[in-house]
């Protein structure tokens, strides 16, 4: 198969094998951006047949690259889940903001590349040599490597000063204090670069120092209108477990207060517009890989009917309050309103049990239907079962089922009152929901996606 200058953007490619053992496959200047690639194998492809391929913004899952020489490929903004690269060569590969989840790099030769702002989540490295300058820019990179600093025969770091052009992880971490000095602006040889400095502090579990470095990075980047860097500082805050919600709130407030839009040229305006939603969503949304519930509500309320709009928003807030009362957990959420005939978009974040409770309340309150309630209860029990050891499952689920039935009576009474307000106000609502289950606990299509009308 020859895919030279082929435009395949947005394609879905599943269970395919591309191997030059049997017949020649050529990927030259192939556009595979924004694709879904699942269960595929790329094998024995040389660089003359595998160059300038654009994988940017693609989601690649359960895929193997074996004995491939990949030249000048672009994996920017791609997500690699359960992907293995083995006996491969990467040359001039772009990996900015590439997310590696449960993936393996085994005997991968790396030349002229940069892991800048990429993310490591539960990955495996074996027989690889990482580029020295790029390591402090990898989110979770230093923390991952520090846990494996004794595995000197598996992971190395490039070094121009060593005879073998590489150093062990132990030797690298022996230099970490010197790197801290190098990246800290208060020293003579400092570079005024706060991202790697924050990463070093995170590796040392000095989270308040790391947060201070990030805040200084915000200040520096805002003054130079570098919104791309601000976004990556926000990503570092979001994915690092040592930072809590208060850190994210403080960062959001600082950014909102500090950015002044007066006197901007059109280029700065476009750059700001591109990144500001990414910045806001990163700080306001739940952590990476958590589940979320997205609600789309269409109403017959016009932009002059403020009282009716207030009723809808109040009910949505009451649903959150009732969910928190039932579950004992705080619910992270936000609501967007579009003018015209008022449309509302609500996002909720948390564990599946909490999101299912919200979903049941929304369906009953806004749309007056209890059709899915039994299904929701069943899925809450399934989620609970997967979070418990086998010995506890039966007893805990019996106890939980009784609690849910008791709570159901309570929220049905309150929901009926809320639904009556909507009917009395002659508000008509159509809606849909999408439940993004990142824990793979729910397989009922009616729970994962639904359409309704009041």
Image (cartoon, rainbow, N blue to C red):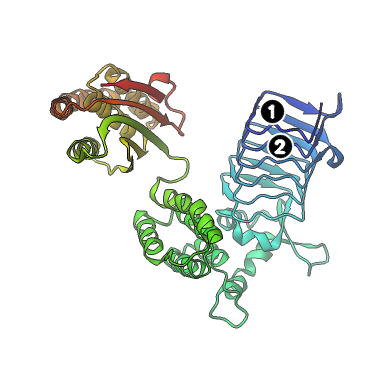
Nearest to N terminus: mark 1 or mark 2: 2
Residue under label 2, please give it: 31
Percent position (x, y) of residue 91? Answer: 78, 50
Instruction: Give the vertical position of 354 relative to 408 (above or below).
Output: below
**The C terminus, quarter of image:** top left
Residue at image position (30%, 19%) is: 372
Residue at image position (69%, 31%) is: 8
Q: Nearer the viewer, residue 301 or 319?
A: 301
Give the total of numbered labels. Answer: 2
What mark, if any, has residue 85 been given in the picture? none
Percent position (x, y) of residue 7? Answer: 72, 33
Give the foreground label among 1 and 2. Answer: 2
Percent position (x, y) of residue 118? Answer: 60, 51
Residue at image position (20%, 41%) is: 306
What mark, if any, has residue 40 been given in the picture? 1
Q: Residues within 10 Å of mark 1 (few under 14, many from 20)?
A: some
Relative to residue 376, is residue 146 drawn left or right? right
SS for tag 2?
loop
Residue 418 image-quadrant placement: top left
Percent position (x, y) of residue 169? Answer: 67, 60
């Amino acid at each position: 198969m020859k895919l030279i200058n082929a435009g395949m953007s947005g394609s879905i490619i599943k269970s395919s094998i591309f191997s030059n053992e049997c017949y020649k496959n050529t990927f030259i200047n192939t556009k595979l951006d924004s694709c879904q690639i699942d269960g595929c194998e790329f094998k024995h492809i040389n660089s003359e047949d595998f160059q300038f391929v654009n994988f940017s913004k693609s989601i690649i899952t359960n895929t193997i690259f074996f004995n491939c020489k990949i030249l000048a490929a672009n994996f920017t903004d791609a997500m690699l889940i359960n992907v293995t690269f083995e006996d491969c060569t990467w040359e001039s590969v772009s990996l900015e903001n590439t997310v590696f989840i449960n993936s393996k790099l085994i005997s991968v030769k790396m030349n002229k590349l940069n892991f800048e702002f990429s993310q490591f989540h539960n990955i495996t490295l074996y027989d690889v040599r990482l580029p020295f300058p790029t390591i402090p820019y990898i989110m979770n990179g230093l923390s991952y490597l520090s846990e494996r600093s004794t595995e000197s025969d598996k992971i190395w770091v490039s070094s121009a000063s060593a005879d073998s052009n590489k150093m062990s992880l132990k030797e690298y971490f022996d230099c970490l204090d010197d790197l801290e000095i190098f990246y800290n602006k208060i020293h003579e040889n400092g570079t005024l670069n706060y991202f790697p400095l924050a990463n070093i502090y995170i590796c040392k579990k000095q989270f308040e120092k790391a947060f201070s470095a990030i805040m200084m990075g915000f200040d520096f980047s805002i003054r130079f209108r570098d919104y791309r860097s601000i976004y990556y500082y926000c990503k570092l805050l979001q994915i690092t477990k040592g930072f809590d919600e208060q850190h994210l709130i403080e960062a959001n407030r600082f950014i909102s207060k500090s950015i002044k839009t007066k006197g901007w040229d059109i280029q700065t305006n476009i750059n700001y517009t591109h990144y500001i939603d990414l910045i806001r969503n990163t700080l306001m949304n739940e952590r990476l890989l958590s589940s979320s519930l997205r609600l789309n509500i269409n109403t017959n309320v016009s932009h002059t009917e403020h009282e009716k709009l207030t009723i809808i928003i109040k009910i949505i807030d009451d649903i959150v309050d009732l969910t928190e009362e039932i579950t004992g957990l705080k619910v992270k959420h936000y609501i967007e309103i579009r003018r015209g005939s008022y449309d509302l978009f609500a996002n909720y974040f948390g564990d599946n049990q909490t999101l299912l409770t919200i979903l049941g309340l929304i369906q009953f309150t806004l749309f007056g239907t209890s059709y899915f309630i039994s299904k929701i209860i069943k899925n809450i029990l399934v989620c609970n079962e997967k979070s418990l050891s086998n010995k506890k499952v039966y007893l805990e689920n019996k106890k939980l089922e009784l609690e849910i039935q008791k709570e159901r009576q309570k929220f049905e009474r309150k929901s009926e009152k809320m639904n009556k307000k909507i009917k009395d106000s002659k508000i008509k609502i159509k809606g849909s929901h999408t439940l993004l289950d990142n824990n793979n606990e729910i397989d009922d299509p009616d729970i994962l996606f639904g359409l309704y009308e009041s």
